[in-house]
Amino acid sequence: MMSREAVYERLNGVFREVFDDDTIVVNDSTTADDIEDWDSFEHINLIVAIEEEFGFKIPMGKTVTMKNVGEMVDIILQMGE
């Protein structure tokens, strides 16, 4: 099972790649409002990139209810069990 820290390490890489910004560091409370280019279109790209990184599909119902990156990490940890 992955640790929360390991998920964040990989997620930071995904966020930096999707948003083309090497300075991004996400945490539990990070939301779309905190990242300049994170709109509904980029959210789809982000989810696809996360699915590719972690090797599973995130159910659509879960992708639309995520309020912050912490909830995203919780879902990744659940899916990866």
Image (spheres, grey):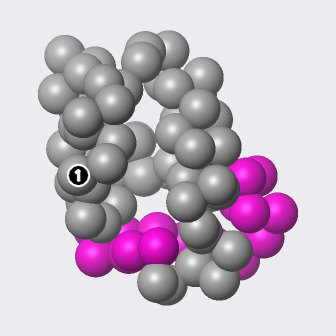
Does dot 1 land on a helix, a strand or a loop? helix
> In the rendered image of this protein, does residue 23 appear above or below residue 14?
below
**Neighbour tally class for label 1: few under 14, some 14-19, many 20 plus, Cα within 10 Å:** few
The answer to whether residue 18 is magenta is yes
Indicate the position of residue 14 as horizontal and vertical percent values. 63, 47
Q: Main secondary structure of the magenta part?
A: loop
Can residue 4 be seen here? The reply is no
Residue located 25% across and 38% down the image: 62
Indicate the position of residue 32 as horizontal and vertical percent values. 47, 73
Magenta-colored span: 16-32
Residue position for label 1: 65
Q: Nearer the viewer, residue 21 or 43?
A: 43
The answer to whether residue 31 is magenta is yes
Q: Nearer the viewer, residue 47 or 70?
A: 47
Residue located 24% across and 34% down the image: 61
Indicate the position of residue 69 as horizontal and vertical percent values. 34, 61
Indicate the position of residue 66 as horizontal and vertical percent values. 26, 55
Whether residue 29 sits left or right of residue 57 in the image: it is: left
| The N terminus - image quarter | top left
